[in-house]
Amino acid sequence: MWQLPGIDKSSQPISNTVSSGTLYLIACHLSYARFAPSHQVFLGNISVLSEPKTFSQAVTDQQWCEAMKQEISVLE
C-alpha cells in the first residue's frame, strides 16, 4: 500500500478531546522518523516558529515591525 513518508498509521489519538478543540492532533499520527535527517531538521525548524497572536505581541518582534512598516508603505 502506498503511504506518504513520515505518516505513522500505528499511532492512536491520545484522547478524544484536545485542548485546542481539535478532535485529532496531527502529532498523534505523524512521525519524523522516516524523513531524511536534513528534512527532519527543516521540519523541526518550521515547527517551532510561531506567529504573534495579538498586535501587542507583534510590536515586540523587530521582524514583524519591519514587515508591518513595509505593508503600510505599500498601501500608502
Image: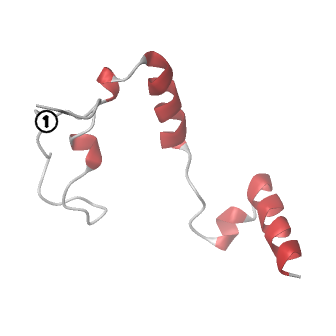
Residue drawn 68% across the image and 69% down it: 56
Q: How many labels were placed on the picture?
A: 1
Amino acid type at image mark 1: Lys
Picture quarter with the C terminus: bottom right
Residue drawn 83% across the image and 59% down it: 66
Q: In this view, does 22 lie above or below 38?
A: below
23 left or right of 38 in image: left
Residue 40 coordinates in the image, percent (x, y) = 44, 25
Residue 54 coordinates in the image, percent (x, y) = 61, 70
Q: Can residue 61 be seen in this view?
A: no
Residue 21 coordinates in the image, percent (x, y) = 26, 66
Residue at the farthest front position: 2
42 left or right of 24 in image: right
Q: Can residue 63 be seen in this view?
A: yes
Picture quarter with the N terminus: top left
Q: Quadrant of residue 36?
A: top left
Q: Name the residue under label 1.
A: 9
Q: In this view, does 37 lie above or below 69?
A: above
Residue drawn 56% across the image and 45% down it: 49
Residue at the farthest top position: 37
Residue 38 coordinates in the image, percent (x, y) = 50, 20
Residue drawn 25% across the image and 62% down it: 22
Q: In which quarter of the image is residue 29?
A: top left
7 left or right of 69 in image: left
Task: Say which of 61 and 45 sits in front.
Answer: 45
Could you tell me which secondary element the residue under label 1 belongs to? loop
Q: Is residue 76 above or below residue 14?
A: below
